[in-house]
Amino acid sequence: MKKVIVTGATGLIGKKLIQALLDRNDEVVIFSRDIKKAKSIFPNVKQIIEWDYHHPEKWKSNLENSDAVVHLAGLNLFAKRWNDEFKKSIIESRQVSTKNLVEAIKLCNKKPEVFISASGIGYYGDCRDNLLTEEFPNGNDFLAEVCKIWESESAKLDTANVRSVQIRTGLVLTPEDGALKQMLLPFKLFIGGHLGNGKQWASWLHIDDIIGIYLHAIDNQNLSGAVNAASPTPVRMKEFAKTLGKVLNRPSFFPVPKFVLKLVVGEAVEVVTASQRVIPDKLVKSGYQFKFTNLEETMRDLL
């Protein structure tokens, strides 16, 4: 049994990860900015600590004697249309929260064995047809810079003899949230299709696999540094949409051009239409076995 501290617990991945930890009898401690919400979602979790990342003096003692810290918290990239103020908030929510957690862990008498921080494949930027292992350099757009800053704060624990892992998450597939949920309605209304030109690569994974990857990162002492979290079988967006249409028994004849997407999401369109052909090299070599690698089987399981 391990003692695992989780931030960002009320998000999609956080909720499912905590349930998985409880199912295997780990002790879970939640750091949450919304105590009431967290208690309503997790009535079986005994320790829920109020967490204002700007004030580590209020919670740093709770890090003592933990085995792992999983840091999922960060402002939703699509919570509102991007402008300079919102982009600044996106960076701060990741950089400052991670920095303060790392500094607090360094001061622990008994430090956790591992610190696992979320990141994203947006680290690479738009890479066309390149195969992206963890060794590929970061891109030069806004989200790539966010991920670079985010990961650099986490990696500072390497000097404190604490294993740090940065999970570069791909397109997590679940009907409960994210891109798949957004695509379902137009397909059900017979107006579904691919996004952008359809030639860009989509690096996806089943929701069960991202949870499995976090558990693997907690348990596997040989896994450290940046880790690509995406199925080993990326597909082009046109194939992604075609497969979704097949599973739903709907056509996929109505693509959404980039200029239309830009009207809806503004500058964030570059995230939506970026091509990222990600290969989970370190995960596979570390022994992680994906539950789902076939896109059609994945969608049938989910839908």
Image (cartoon, rainbow, N blue to C red):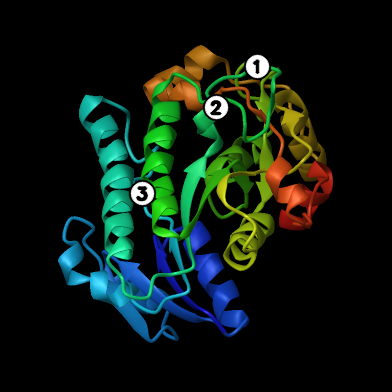
| Mark 1 residue element | loop
The amino acid type found where label 3 is placed reads: Gly
Q: Earlier in the sequence, mark 3 or mark 1?
A: 3
CA–CA distance between discs 2 and 1? 11 Å
Q: Which residue is mark 1?
A: 128
Quarter placement of the N terminus: bottom right
**Residue at the spot 37% in from the left edge and 75% down from the top edge:** 110
Per the image, the residue denoted by label 3 is 74
Would residue 36 be visible to someone looking at this image?
Answer: no
Q: Quadrant of the C terminus?
A: bottom right
Disc 2 target residue? 124
Q: Amino acid at mark 2?
A: Tyr
Q: Nearer the viewer, mark 2 or mark 1?
A: 2
Residue lying at 66% horizontally and 62% vertically, measured from the top left: 212
The residue located at (33%, 51%) in the rendering is 98
User: Upstream in the sequence, badge 2 or badge 3?
Assistant: 3
| Mark 2 → mark 3, Cα distance in angstroms | 19 Å
The amino acid marked with disc number 1 is Arg
Q: Is residue 82 above or below residue 114?
A: above
Residue at image x 45%, y 78%?
A: 28
**Looking at the picture, does residue 23 appear above or below residue 16?**
below
Residue density around tag 1, few if under 14, some if 14–19, many if 20 or more, within 10 Å = few
Which quadrant of the view contains residue 236? top right
Q: For numbered disc 2, what is the local secondary structure?
A: helix
Dots 3, 1 in contact, CB < 8 A: no
